[in-house]
Amino acid sequence: MDPLVIDIEPDNVSRLSVIFSALFLFTQIPLQQIVIISIVLLLDLYDGLVARKFGKNGKKGLVVDLACDRVSELVIFIRSPYLLFFVLINTLLSILKIKKGSHALPLRHLYLLYLLWLAFF
């Protein structure tokens, strides 16, 4: 193994994305919200990469990842009650993903695009 490569737990990266999501509650400035959601999405991407790189992509890791993703969405959308319905739908889709391999809606990605639209147009 390369001595410069650090064996990181993907579950911890997933948990870190939830912590960054919590920062979203404390900001009203669109550019800061864009940065926070971008970091959350990058961490979500990174946890999967780390899991595959170190062979830690088991069912437990999938459950932790999906749970952290849903909690992250809940935290981000808590100020927008009309979007909480979609978080509920995503939670149900995540349960199905664990059982049958379905896909969740890219809510945070779409919200990022919405914030970018508001900030630049």
Image (cartoon, rainbow, N blue to C red):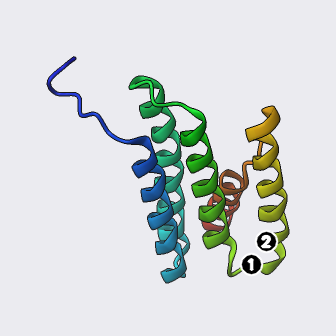
Q: Residue at x 23, y 28 (%)?
A: 5
Circles 2 and 1, Cβ within 8 Å, touching? The answer is: yes
Which image quarter holds the N terminus? top left
Residue at position x 72%, y 54% in the image: 110
Quadrant in the picture for residue 116:
bottom right
Rendered residue at 56%/49% (across/down): 64
Q: Amino acid at mark 1?
A: Ser
List x then y, in percent, for residue 11.
45, 47
Frontmost residue, 34 versus 75 = 75
Few, some or many residues within 10 Å of mark 2 (<14, 14–19, 20+): some
From the top left corner, tell me how far across and down residue 65 is, in percent: 57, 47
Quarter-of-image position of residue 8: top left
What residue would you read off at disc 2?
A: 84
Q: Nearer the viewer, residue 23 or 14?
A: 14
Instruction: Tell me if I can see residue 10 in this picture.
Output: yes
> Is residue 105 visible in this depiction of the protein?
no
The secondary element bearing badge 2 is classed as helix
- Residue 49: image location, x then y, percent: 46, 31
In the image shown, does 89 or 36 lie closer to the viewer? 89
Q: Residues within 10 Å of mark 1 (few under 14, many from 20)?
A: few
Q: Amino acid at mark 2?
A: Leu
- In the figure, is residue 24 to the left or right of 67? left
Q: Which residue is mark 1?
A: 80
For the residue labelled by badge 1, is the local secondary structure a helix, a strand or a loop?
A: loop
Q: Quadrant of the C terminus?
A: bottom right
Residue at 46%, 73% (x, y): give it. Answer: 23
